[in-house]
Amino acid sequence: MARHLAGRIAGLVVILFLICLFTYLIFFKLSPDPALMICGKTCTPDRVAQIRSVLGLDQPLTEQFWNFLSGLFAGRDYGSGANLVHCPAPCFGYSFQTSQSVWEMILDRLPVSVTVAVGAAVLWLIVGIAAGLLSAVKEGTWWDRTAMGLALGGSSIPNYVLALALQYVLVVRLQVLPFPAAVPFSDDPVAWFQSYLMPWIVLATGYACLYARLTRANVIDTLAENFMRTARSKGLRPALLLRRHALRPALTPITTIFGMDFAALLGGALITETVFGLNGVGKMAADSIAKNDQPVIMAVTLLAAFFVVVGNVVVDLVYTGLDPRVRVR
């Protein structure tokens, strides 16, 4: 197990290194000159050259990438002399638009994205797995057909359409919920819950529909296995049979997609946060894309990639608890 874990961590480091390399090349070498973007349209060539020198863009490519990579772990310096600015680790640079540290911008907005992701994940897991399990048990009944029909329809609705519809019905017409805002839990727990309820529902709807269909298919397949017939012949109670013998192996593929889905959401729910005006990482990425703020876009890309890669490693470890057949000795 220890050797397997060490191998997974080594692979994680290699993948993250390659992601850093490709991301850096895309945003700083294949995109417009950052010095021109910072300086503006009326800038002189001397000023452009000065900005390039401060950012280290006049150095060889390998040295530029090394400075960027080392800055993530040890920080880095911009400029020299009286104009020296130290960027502490992890240094993703400074925003071209606000001159604020990109890492500080992410830290300010990450709690909102984490709140949205965790709340939605809890909701879609409970609803999706429960609906899928009940449909599998009642296969072919009116409940099964109705639930799966709703799941198919729910997974077909785009997030932004559902978000706008919920805002119109619950906020404008019925006025039972306020318009979403990033209210801290410590300030007002009720307002916090009300503000995040619609984003949670919007994000959870599509995932819950997908998980319900996947859970149903996996449980039906598991119920047809030989070991399930053996368990029934021993006279086990139906509830125990489902919980211990049917649901557990059926959760293995669900764990895989949940690790990917949840990790991706931690990097920011771009559409949902933008529609509801929640100032999270996703909305920050959308604003930065519109303004071509390269350091911010690159930092959010690396953050999302980090969550996804780490999520895969965590899923591998969870597998060993769910399914003894995949345990590595």
Image (cartoon, grey):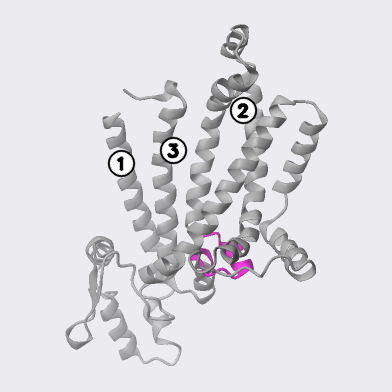
Provide the residue designation for mark 2: 218
Tally the marks.
3
Relative to 263, say whether 35 is above or below.
below
User: Counting residues from the N terminus, which is met first, the one under dot 1 or under dot 3?
Assistant: 1
Quadrant of the image containing the N terminus: top left
Are the two marked residues, 2 and 3, in contact with CB atoms closer than 8 angstroms? no
Under tag 3, what secondary structure?
helix
* Crowdedness near tag 2: few (<14), some (14–19) or many (≥20) residues, C-alpha within 10 Å: many
Based on the displayed image, in which of its 4 quarters is residue 278 positioned? Answer: bottom right
Give the overall secondary structure of the magenta segment.
helix
Relative to 319, say whether 295 is above or below.
below
Q: Amino acid at mark 3?
A: Val
Residue in the picture at 24% in, 66% down: 67
Provide the residue designation for mark 3: 315
Reply yes or no: does residue 273 show up in magenta: yes
Q: Is residue 25 visible?
A: yes
- Eye-nearest disc, 1 or 2: 2
Q: Amino acid at mark 1?
A: Ile
Picture coordinates of residue 158, whole percent (x, y): 69, 56
User: Counting residues from the N terminus, which is met first, the one under dot 2 or under dot 3?
Assistant: 2
Distance between the Cα atoms at labels 1 and 3? Answer: 13 Å
Residue in the picture at 47% in, 50% down: 263
* Crowdedness near tag 1: few (<14), some (14–19) or many (≥20) residues, C-alpha within 10 Å: some
Quadrant of the image containing the C terminus: top left
Relative to 15, say whether 185 is above or below.
below
* Numbered label attached to residue 9: 1
User: Counting residues from the N terminus, which is met first, the one under dot 1 or under dot 2?
Assistant: 1
Q: Amino acid at mark 2?
A: Asn
Distance between the Cα atoms at labels 1 and 2? Answer: 30 Å
From which residue to which does the magenta span run?
268-283
